[in-house]
Image: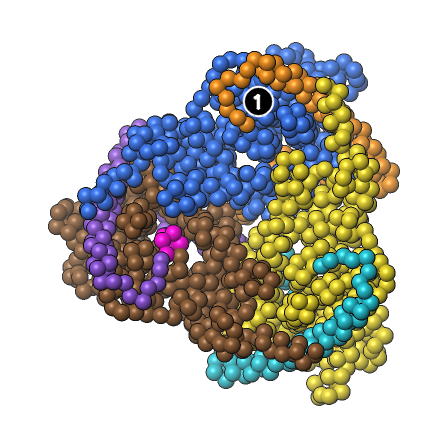
Chain colours: A blue, B yellow, C brown, D cyan, E orange, F purple
Amino acid sequence: MIGSSFNQLWQSTGLYGFMGMVEGFGIGNLIMILVGFVLLYLAIKKGFEPLLLVTIGFGCILSNIPMGYIAGVDPSTGDAGFIKLLFDMGIASGLFPILIFMGVGAMTDFGPLIANPKTLLLGAAAQAGIFVALLGALALSFIPGISFDLFAAGSIGIIGGADGPTAIYVTSRLAPDLLGPIAVAAYSYMALVPIIQPPIMTALTTKQERMIRMQQLRPVSKLEKILFPITVLTTCAILLPSATPLIGSLMFGNLAKECGVVNRLSDTMQNALMNIVTIFLGLSVGSKMEASHFLNLNTLGILVLGMIAFSIGTAAGVLIAKLMNKLDPKHPVNPLIGSAGVSAVPMAARVSSKVGQQSDPQNFLLMHAMGPNVAGVIGSAVAAGVLLAVIPFMAG
Amino acid sequence: MIGSSFNQLWQSTGLYGFMGMVEGFGIGNLIMILVGFVLLYLAIKKGFEPLLLVTIGFGCILSNIPMGYIAGVDPSTGDAGFIKLLFDMGIASGLFPILIFMGVGAMTDFGPLIANPKTLLLGAAAQAGIFVALLGALALSFIPGISFDLFAAGSIGIIGGADGPTAIYVTSRLAPDLLGPIAVAAYSYMALVPIIQPPIMTALTTKQERMIRMQQLRPVSKLEKILFPITVLTTCAILLPSATPLIGSLMFGNLAKECGVVNRLSDTMQNALMNIVTIFLGLSVGSKMEASHFLNLNTLGILVLGMIAFSIGTAAGVLIAKLMNKLDPKHPVNPLIGSAGVSAVPMAARVSSKVGQQSDPQNFLLMHAMGPNVAGVIGSAVAAGVLLAVIPFMAG
Amino acid sequence: MIGSSFNQLWQSTGLYGFMGMVEGFGIGNLIMILVGFVLLYLAIKKGFEPLLLVTIGFGCILSNIPMGYIAGVDPSTGDAGFIKLLFDMGIASGLFPILIFMGVGAMTDFGPLIANPKTLLLGAAAQAGIFVALLGALALSFIPGISFDLFAAGSIGIIGGADGPTAIYVTSRLAPDLLGPIAVAAYSYMALVPIIQPPIMTALTTKQERMIRMQQLRPVSKLEKILFPITVLTTCAILLPSATPLIGSLMFGNLAKECGVVNRLSDTMQNALMNIVTIFLGLSVGSKMEASHFLNLNTLGILVLGMIAFSIGTAAGVLIAKLMNKLDPKHPVNPLIGSAGVSAVPMAARVSSKVGQQSDPQNFLLMHAMGPNVAGVIGSAVAAGVLLAVIPFMAG
Amino acid sequence: MVFLAQLPKEQLVTQLQNGVILMVLGIATVFVFLTLLVFLTKGMSALVRKLAPEKPKAVVSSPAAVSTSAASASEADIAAAIVAAFAKSKE
Amino acid sequence: MVFLAQLPKEQLVTQLQNGVILMVLGIATVFVFLTLLVFLTKGMSALVRKLAPEKPKAVVSSPAAVSTSAASASEADIAAAIVAAFAKSKE
Amino acid sequence: MVFLAQLPKEQLVTQLQNGVILMVLGIATVFVFLTLLVFLTKGMSALVRKLAPEKPKAVVSSPAAVSTSAASASEADIAAAIVAAFAKSKE
Ligand code: NA
Ligand code: NA
Ligand code: NA
């Protein structure tokens, strides 16, 4: 009896599971745990988007522990693990990314965009990467071993939106099995923006263009800041209701911040609520990094396509800025701020500023780059709305 | 194919929905969105109960966007929108108003009431408005186009309790379809207390009465403050268990505040938890302002009856104070503090104080008015308990 | 008609319920309410673990109010009370103790343990109480009127872990009906540690032993503190996956604290999230103090066994420290820090320090006792993992 | 709740009768409950002052103190205190 | 989403066609939407300056101010202010 | 868990036997696990000191610092600091 109990204990060790002796577990789990440790390393040591990569990485580790059933259901008792509970509560339902977006809205200052609305076009252009990557995903599917349908392709494209909650929301709606690689790609590339963007930006611009100084932004009144979220929401309600969950929660957060009469709510959206949801969301997303869904050619395809999406978005932003200068030479735009249109707030705007100062240390582009930067958030949400509205109809 | 896709996109615009081309949507949604904007205007510009009216207003707007399905279920995918998730989580279940009440308890100082317990009677009298409005709702139902059953009438009456969470809790239990108009009426009239009450107060009192000075309140010991919530809860448990969810959570919050050993919990009840629940509750309540349930004669009836309830509650509070002065002339009560018995904490108490100072600038009634003010919260919860216990029995 | 309504109101009073006139309620509820008041008294007046005993006590009171249906389902309407909602959300699912453990991890400094790893053995020894109490529970079942199966015995044993969330997690998995008495016993005895432990500690040590001074702890680098939670988690994943929900969440919280790049998340784990969950968890656990499950000989058995578990854990910690001194006399350990191995953080460590200073006022043991103290948390979680892995297999 | 175009008159009258009963019951219960509370509160206070005649600590505090986003408010206070302190120290 | 070893070529071509349509539709919608927003925002600002020509209060604030754990940050600021104050007061 | 008036004696004996096994298994596992951790922790520390011999920053901090409602506490500290500062500056 004691022997059989020791045997039972041995058969319930993780080691036994890693050796592939239990159905559903194996060496793949060990590899994914190491991937989780790499994410932790990147987050802690390299400072890559730590809020998300620490939680996603830890979620990945916990979910891949054999017979821990932390992100699954224990077959012997029927009890669901705590990460599965969190996943069902907030990712399967789509609630968590919406709440994060509320907090993002409450932390965003649309002032620079209101002061110079034409930078919205830069935020539009930079979404090109989304659709090119979508097409790329469908093209890659001709390669044996890689297989993406329209739902998957749309989710992969949205990586190019450079906006975490949008990517997670769209993927949870269209292709939840791909959440792991898509979220990891999105956050990793957002962290890598200072490495990905500068070469593209300098390749597409002349030194003279990079030295363009822009007029100082006019001050924006409180009333304008209050009316802006309402304007955006109204436009969205009339044109593209499928984008209203995202745009609506973003603008709700922003209105709460700007209206000045509900500061305690806006504080909570930015802090307690956002932090709680970030913890839950990160762990849940990490749980989709299961060996069986992650360790395949598709993941490699996603990583490549994500990089392409970021690069094309960056290039499109810069190029459209140059086009705008051609069309309206009186109000010149430094094309370096075009790259900020991919969103990746506020990292991309800082990159614009930094690259600009390499050509002219006295040229302060940060404020100017914040306009396209936040426009990119709106642009990605609009693109997400198109995907969510059209793909189920096309596929059905 | 591209034509049919463009057509699909056009048919998924909000404009198409507002034009009534999609089943379940129409011009009524546009009207309700405008109502939502009016609520935002009142909250932001006029400062009417902004914590609730900003969130309710925004919830109303989001929920009425055609084909946004933010407060409903998308028929093509079966996905529930995020406000529907919040509604089911906290309003249908009754959880959110209870948690708000916990926070209210943790923010309430019953000291003035303990120092002068007979002001409890003022809080009792002011509940008369609840039952008169209930009767009024049943009488109004004789008018064609207006139709309230007992459940609806009880929910309408509770507007007269001048207490948001109580009104929402009772309505969610008795007549959830009326949540929209009832919550809007309750919070709007609470915000309008400085306009509604003063004429009634001056009409029912003589200048001499308004100048009555009251004895300074005695200090209240910490032990009394700890024992008070326990006394109220015990009384409620023995007499009226149906009121214990409300009274119990109120007194739990208050005990957490007063006992002094769980300050971190009481802090959280008042801040992080209360703010999160307020956001969720406001959006959810706003989602019940659907065109089909809001744009009818019943809503008009509710608004009229709510006003009547507030007025009668105010009058009853003032009159009973005058009666108390007749019966016990040695301890005179300024009848102006009677109006504070409707609750609407702390607005109604401030109104008492302000009207008092119009007759005698040196007469400080604020502290004295806080007694009946918090008594009104208890009184409303007791009245709610009666409604919840008796109405299902009468109707069944 | 009015008569029948009054009658209905009378039949819905708590008094009528206490008198046993309604199925499912009776005088037992009154007794349990008094028990709830005793818990409040101990928490508020005596300062016994107030965060938990105030909430558990209040939850006990609310849940025992006849026909309040706060922790049950109202049979006439089918509505679940709010404490039942909280219970199902977080205790039945096991989520709340896990979230608490995350916060505990974010509040714990493993530095003293890393500086002197062999104190881990003291934390191991003190778990002896768990298994002796388990055996005791099975032995007590020979007494008529007391009846514990293996599931119950495991849950009772875990009281000896002196760790609230671990006890609640294990019991919610193995014997949810015993949650009330087990949680009360665990938290009460943790509060009573300053009374229970000192006599055992002095009885088992000589004055000379109690005066042993320990070498000052070496400073621990940030990198070590980051790698420690990862080391523990990895060990646990390889050896004992059934303990990973507990160990994993503890180490997630600790990594969030130590890594230094997600301070806003670690802040939230320690404060807003922990407080919210504590409120919900306390109320829910209190709801398991129903008269029918609490007022019986089993509860008495649980209280006795819990005390035995604490005492044996204390003794084992002290004795193993003495053994270590025999085996390795060059690095003497003051045996008084052995008792801290039961966990009950940080109370047990303070007791070690205080008892030490009774023999030598210049001997500062607090830091040294923190090592076994936090080791005890890990040890209890490991013991919990064994129970969770083996008991269902043995019983099935 | 059912939304009917119009309830039959009989039912409306029955409802109204029920409403009157509810009003009587409700107002009575509220008054009985709160009147009882008056006496219980007085009794409780008397008992406290007899059994634990501690120096009362807390004067009843201001209703304005109903906390609004406590943290930020108090930080503002601290900042204000610093500013005030500076102003003074420069005198 | 279904993971197939390989979709049949025909289906892949159809998908690609759909993808092209989606790209056209998507880029068009994004540009129409944001271009419209350019005009609406300009109109809104013009209207505000005409109807409510209040002195603009807020200069556009720094993006660095995107709050990170606001509470602790501002406490650190306060602490820094105190230290700075001290340093100065000792001069 | 099932509450029985009394389990049959045989079952009680079997349970007790299982309990003894569980005790042996449990105590053994706890000791093996934590003993392993002793060596792993020592190894980890040795490795860290060899590979990254950085000046150790943190002296082990006080257990009293286990945060209780951190925000308010630190605000109180700040307030205290201000008061102290003032007291000193007036000297
Ligand atoms: Na974007
Ligand atoms: Na009231
Ligand atoms: Na322990």
Front one among A391 and D42: A391
Magenta-colored stretch includes residue C174: yes
Image x and y of residue A358, in percent: 59, 18
Based on the displayed image, in which of its 4 quarters is residue A172 positioned?
top right
Magenta-colored stretch includes residue C349: no
Task: Mark yes or no: residue D12 visible.
Answer: yes
For label 1, the SS is: loop
Residue at 23% of width from left, 53% of height from top?
F18
Q: What chain does mark 1 sit on?
A: A
Image x and y of residue D55, in percent: 51, 78
Image x and y of residue B245, in percent: 58, 65
Q: Residues within 10 Å of mark 1 (few under 14, many from 20)?
A: many
Front one among B11 and B205: B11
Residue at 44% of width from left, 74% of height from top?
C28
**Which segment did they paint magenta?**
C170-175
As displayed, is residue A279 above or below residue B151? above
**In the rendered structure, which amino acid carries the disc numbered 1?**
Asp
- Left or right placement of residue E18 versus residue C222 in this view: right
- Left or right placement of residue C89 versus residue F20 in this view: right
Task: Mark yes or no: residue B187 visible.
Answer: no
Please name the predominant secondary structure of the magenta segment in the image.
helix
Residue at 67% of width from left, 21% of height from top?
E22
Residue at 63% of width from left, 56% of height from top?
D68
Image x and y of residue B202, in percent: 84, 73
Based on the displayed image, in which of its 4 quarters is residue F29 positioned?
top left
Q: Which residue is mark 1?
A: A149
Front one among A205 and B382: B382
As displayed, is residue B118 above or below residue A133? below
